[in-house]
Amino acid sequence: MTLIELIHYFRTNGNQDEFFKNNSLDTESEVVEIYMQKPFSLENEIKFFEIEKSRGKVEYEIDNVKYFNLIDFYYFIDFIEDSKKKKNENMTDIKLAEILLNYCINDA
């Protein structure tokens, strides 16, 4: 799944509990974090790790692949809720993904 696909899923009434269940994520986790391989790109696949596994590390390696923390799921959900506001309703999933990725790289 890419960041664009994740945004599309949640903008079209995706459910967090269902998403966690379908992606074998612990719904009781304190935080689920979104990771991506470098170099960061909208085409890159994203991965989800519970903070209890990743321990909040910026760089997390699993199966000899290094992933880098982009953002936590709570912030992502806030971003999605903001994207549903009237002023943002005409923004495409791609544009929103560009904004979010830029924020993750430069400001987070």
Image: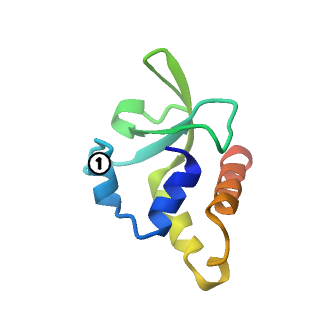
The residue depicted at 34 percent of the width and 64 percent of the height is 15
The residue depicted at 74 percent of the width and 47 percent of the height is 106
**In the picture provided, is 54 more to the left or to the right than 105?**
left
Q: Position of residue 41 (x, y in %)?
A: 68, 40
**In the picture provided, is 72 more to the left or to the right than 26?**
right
The residue depicted at 52 percent of the width and 53 percent of the height is 5
Tell me where residue 94 sits by quadrant: bottom right
User: Tag 1: Cα neighbours inside 10 Å, few (<14), some, or many (≥20)?
Assistant: few
The residue depicted at 46 percent of the width and 53 percent of the height is 73
**In the picture provided, is 47 more to the left or to the right than 99?**
left
Who is closer to the viewer here, 27 or 39?
39
Tell me where residue 44 sits by quadrant: top right
Would you name the residue on which mark 1 appears? 22
* Direction bottom: furthest residue: 86
- Would you place residue 22 above or below residue 74 in this image? above
Q: How many marks?
A: 1
What's the coloring here?
A: rainbow
**In the picture provided, is 27 more to the left or to the right than 81?**
left
Q: Position of residue 42 (x, y in %)?
A: 66, 45
Who is closer to the viewer here, 64 or 2?
2
Q: Position of residue 97 (x, y in %)?
A: 64, 56
**Secondary structure under the numbered disc 1 in the rendered image:** helix
Q: Amino acid at mark 1?
A: Asn
Q: Position of residue 32 (x, y in %)?
A: 40, 46
